[in-house]
Image (tube, rainbow, N blue to C red):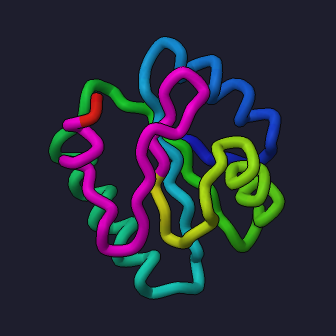
């Protein structure tokens, strides 16, 4: 996972998403549901390695400003935990809480 630490990385992420799909995983480090969702996602990703799909990780407590930028840029409602699938600079799929499912994301690739 690539740590998302500044909003300029979103520009790089959008450029990359023109070549291959990119996932953003938004995580609240104080939330047990978010921790469970992250753990499940990481296990599935490690086992399935979906076409070297890049995953950007956002710690919401450290970077709420970036989360707000994500909501504005991709026209999505903020949730936590949350995954976003980005293609060509557009969010084509989002899921939160127990709906986060790597298999479902893979089917959209």
Quadrant in the rendering for residue 95: bottom left
The spot of residue 104 in percent (x, y) is: 22, 48
- The residue depicted at 17 percent of the width and 41 percent of the height is 48
Quadrant in the rendering for residue 28: bottom right
Judge by depth and name the residue closer to the eye, 52 or 108. 108
Quadrant in the rendering for residue 37: bottom left
The spot of residue 29 in percent (x, y) is: 58, 77
- The residue depicted at 64 percent of the width and 18 percent of the height is 15
Q: Which residues are magenta?
A: 84-107
Looking at the image, the residue that sits furthest to the front is 75
Q: Is residue 82 above or below residue 36?
A: above
Residue 1 in view? no
The verdict on residue 92 being magenta is yes
The spot of residue 4 in percent (x, y) is: 67, 46
Judge by depth and name the residue closer to the eye, 5 or 24. 24
Q: Is residue 11 above or below residue 47?
A: above
């Amino acid at each position: 996972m690539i740590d998302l630490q500044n909003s300029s990385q979103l520009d790089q992420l959008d450029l990359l998403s023109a070549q291959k799909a990119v996932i953003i995983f938004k995580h609240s480090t104080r939330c047990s549901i978010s921790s469970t969702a992250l753990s499940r996602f990481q296990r599935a990703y490690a086992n399935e390695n979906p076409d070297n799909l890049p995953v950007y990780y956002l710690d919401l407590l450290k970077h709420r400003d970036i989360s707000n930028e994500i909501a504005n840029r991709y026209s999505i409602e903020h949730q936590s935990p949350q995954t976003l699938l980005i293609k060509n600079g557009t969010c084509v799929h989002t899921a939160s809480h127990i709906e986060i499912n790597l298999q479902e994301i893979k089917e959209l690739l």
